[in-house]
Image (spheres, helix red, strand yellow):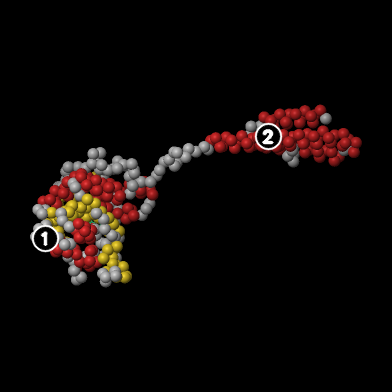
Amino acid sequence: MTDITNQTQAALAAIAAATSLNALEAQRLDTLGKKGWVSLALKTLGGMSPEQRAAAAPAIQTARADIAAALDARKAALETAELEARLARETIDLTLPAAPAPRGSVHPVSQVMDELAEIFADLGFAVATGPEIEDDWHNFTALNMDETHPARAMHDTFYFPDKSGDGKDILLRTHTSPVQIRSMLAQGAPIRLIAPGRVYRSDSDATHTPMFHQVEGLVVGRDIHLGHLKWTLETFFKAFFEREDIVLRLRPSYFPFTEPSVEVDVGYSTEGGRRVVGGHGDAPGHAWMELGGSGMVNRRVLEFAGIDPDEYQGFAFGLGIDRIAMLKYGMNDLRAFFDGDPRWLQHYGFSPFDQPTLAAGVGAKA
Ligand code: FA5
């Protein structure tokens, strides 16, 4: 009797002192578990005479009931305490930015487009846009490439199966040059604009992708000549690459929509497997890389666009944005630009807080 009372007191004290659900479970096993002393004591009742059983049973039953009640009460108290602690620990402040810190980054193409717009805005250029789904008149005909012109075949064009309502072929624009036509028709001369955007050609290797980006430049005025073109491109590239030793080579070329036409190459060297822009392409350890085409706007194009070629002249250029992004930021495979691999974006992407400004330098600091 006294034994059971003492044991019960000790068990109740241990239960009250249990500070975790695990410690409490250990107490339950010790007492009410299959091999716990209360269960074993209950078992002994079976072997007793009715009188002995009547004398011993109440104390054991009481011990079992008291211990069971104490276990339940302590369990409830511990669970409540744990819930409260968790609630206190897990408070969230909805005014804070989502955690972990925002991971999004600006794609190098978007970054370079912002940089282009910033530099050309400083030179007084507006930014124009045009549709990516074009008709063959704006993409070819008005750019002096008539139906039989070999240049139409030179561009590997994605055509749509249906024609437009007025019988024109519909295609994905192969260059940004149709924006020249649309802008001249809409606003006439004089004009000074850039038109960055996506273009499409059936083309794919490490330096060609079926979708890529160009920036078109167009300046039309009364006394515009090739010298203005060279100065503009040189000034742009010096600001863009943030160095003074940029050397451009204008190589005679042919585009139906410019006359004369010149291809623009920039001198670079290779340091540690990375192309670094700067220096004369013919200097030892240097080479030239083609960045785009340009020239004086062909008279025929001005006529198509409703501008009198005897009164106005203009220059135009078209640069591969992806190419200049690769040169500036050191990527060597163009296809990775469009894979959407988050590891590539984390490596080459830019902070959205890093806005290109001429004052702070247009180059991103990422
Ligand atoms: C043109 O697209 C002309 N419209 C450029 C132009 C504009 C000339 C105005 C004169 C006046 P071209 O096909 O060479 O030209 O392309 C221009 C630049 O786009 C190339 O120098 C290259 O940098 C880039 N480019 C061309 N094809 C691809 C491609 N598949 N992937 C990535 N970049 C390309």
- Residue 282 visible? The answer is no
Determine the quadrant in which ligand 1 lies.
Answer: bottom left
Side of 50 relative to 204 (left or right): right
Q: Mark 1 points at which residue?
A: 309
Q: Where is residue 38 in the image (x, y as percent from the top left)?
A: 77, 36
Q: Where is residue 25 in the image (x, y as percent from the top left)?
A: 67, 37
Displayed quadrant of residue 95: top left
Q: Number of callouts in the render?
A: 2
Which residue occupies 29% across, 42% down? 355
10 Å neighbourhood of mark 2: few (<14), some, or many (≥20)?
A: many
Q: Do the residues labelled 1 and 2 touch (CB within 8 Å)?
A: no
Front-lying residue, 123 or 354: 123
Q: Residue at coordinates 78% horizontally, 38% vertically from top-left?
A: 40
Q: Position of residue 169 (x, y in %)?
A: 27, 69
- Element at badge 1? loop
Which is more foreground, mark 1 or mark 2?
1
Label disc, if present, on residue 271 of the rendered structure = none
Amino acid type at mark 1? Pro
| Mark number, residue 74 | 2
- The secondary element bearing badge 2 is classed as helix
Residue type marked 2: Arg
Crowdedness near tag 1: few (<14), some (14–19) or many (≥20) residues, C-alpha within 10 Å: some
In the picture provided, is 132 more to the left or to the right than 12?
left
Residue occupying image coordinates x 84% and y 36%: 57
- Mark-to-mark CA distance, 1 and 2: 96 Å
The quadrant where residue 168 appears: bottom left
Quarter of the image with the C terminus is top left
